[in-house]
Amino acid sequence: MSKNVSRTVEQLAEPIVRELHLELVEVEYKKEGPNWYLRVFIDADRGVNLDDCEAVSEKLSEVLDDVDPIKEAYFLEVSSPGAERPLKKEADVKKAVGKGVYVTTYEPIDGQKAFEGVLVSFEDATLVIEGKNKTRTVTYTVPYAKVANARLSILL
C-alpha cells in the first residue's frame, strides 16, 4: 500500500515542484509508531530553503485534499534530502560526477558490495569511483545495473 501511495503522490507532486523550478527527489510514505508520515524531498541546484518547502507543502496539501488518495490520517513533511541525498535516477548520478558518493551493489564486485569515493565518471551505464584503500588510491568500476543504493557522501 505505501508504495502505491508514494507513486500516486509523486505524480501529484511532480508538476507542483516543476512549476516552482525545483526537483522532486523522493516521496516516502511510512508508518512510524502509531503515525503515518508522508515525506516529500525536494532539491534545486541552488539548494532549497524554508520558503520553497512551505510553497510545495501548501500547494500539495490543496491537491491532496481534493484528490484524497490517502484514507488514514498522516503528517505531511516537505524538506531537503540533505547533504547526503539519494541518487535515485541516472540523471542524479550524472549530476554527481566530481562529487563524493557512497554506492552499494546487489552482488559483490571483486569481493565487495560497498564503494565510497569521488565519482570520476558515469558513461556507458558504468560508474567509475576513485576511492581510498588505506593509504593507496583505488579505482572501482561499478555497472549501474548492479547498483542497489547510491547517495552523495561527505568525504573526510
Image (tube, grey):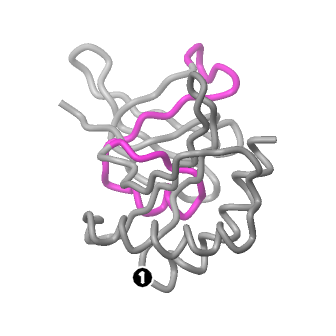
Q: In the rendered image, which quarter is residue 16 located in? A: bottom right
| Left or right: where 46 falls relative to 10 | left
The total number of labels drawn is: 1
Q: Residue at x 62, y 23 (%)?
A: 109
Query: Residue 98 location in percent, x, y?
Result: 31, 54
**Front residue of this view, candidates 42 and 144:** 42
Q: Which residues are magenta?
A: 84-112
Residue on which the image places disc 1: 21
Q: Is residue 56 magenta?
A: no
Residue 115 vertical placement versus 91 (above, below): above
Residue 109 vertical placement versus 29 (above, below): above
| Left or right: where 15 falls relative to 136 | right
Q: Is residue 98 magenta?
A: yes
Query: Residue 110 location in percent, x, y?
Result: 59, 19
| Left or right: where 98 falls relative to 16 | left
**Residue type, mark 1 in image:** His
Quarter of the image with the C terminus is top left
Q: 10 Å neighbourhood of mark 1: few (<14), some, or many (≥20)?
A: few
Q: Residue at x 55, y 29 (%)?
A: 104
